[in-house]
Amino acid sequence: MKVTYNEAEKSIEIKDELKNQYFILKFLMILNLFNALVRLINMDKYDFGFMEILWAVTVIISLIVFYFLIFKKSNAEKISIEKIKRLKEKSFLGRKRFALELTNGKQRDLSSLKGEEDFVKVRKLLTEVGIEN
């Protein structure tokens, strides 16, 4: 991943393939929803068993993931400095993950940062352009 600052546009440019990954995830969630809803609509009223419960759970999980991908995550490759609130660090199962918290409530994941030295570089870049950590 490559994070650079564009002085002319006053924006951060992030080069990773997150846009493609999110597109594939959204496509798979829509496919899951379609498949599960077709299965549930075509069932008999009185034949609600284990498979139908699994399909209902699949609908719920797909809706939750799709909601987060649309309304809580950003895949923008070019982000204006004014739209960035701060650099966020969180730990999940012993692995550190980093994200840019945006003013519109979304987060831009920096999933390709491969350790502390990449994080330090990005933190230094953001501090230089006036974004607090």
Image: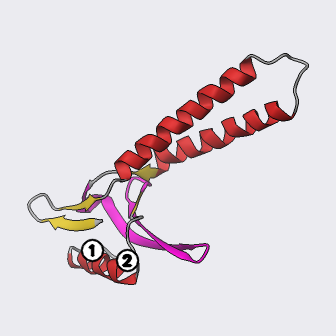
In the rendered view, would you say 73 is above or below 6?
above
In the rendered view, would you say 21 is above or below 47?
below
Position of the N terminus by quadrant = bottom left
**Identity of the amino acid at label 2?**
Asn
On the image, the x and y values in percent for residue 120 come to 33, 82
Report the magenta stretch's main SS: strand
Element under disc 1: helix
In the rendered view, would you say 110 is above or below 117?
above
- Number of numbered discs: 2
**Identity of the amino acid at label 1?**
Leu
Mark 2 or 1, nearer chain start: 1
On the image, the x and y values in percent for residue 104 come to 39, 52
Residue for point 24% across, 62% down = 81
On the image, the x and y values in percent for residue 55 come to 74, 33
Instruction: Name the side, left or right, on which 127 lies relative to 46.
Output: left
Residue for point 66% across, 43% down = 61
Q: Which mark is residue 30?
A: none
The residue tagged 1 is 126
* Residue contact between numbered discs 2 and 1, judged by CB atoms under 8 Å: yes
User: Magenta segment: does it hold 64?
Assistant: no
Residue for point 54% across, 41% down = 66
In the rendered view, would you say 57 is above or below 5?
above
Q: Which residues are magenta?
A: 78-107
Q: Nearer the viewer, residue 69 or 106?
A: 69
Position of the C terminus by quadrant = bottom left
Q: Which mark is residue 133?
A: 2
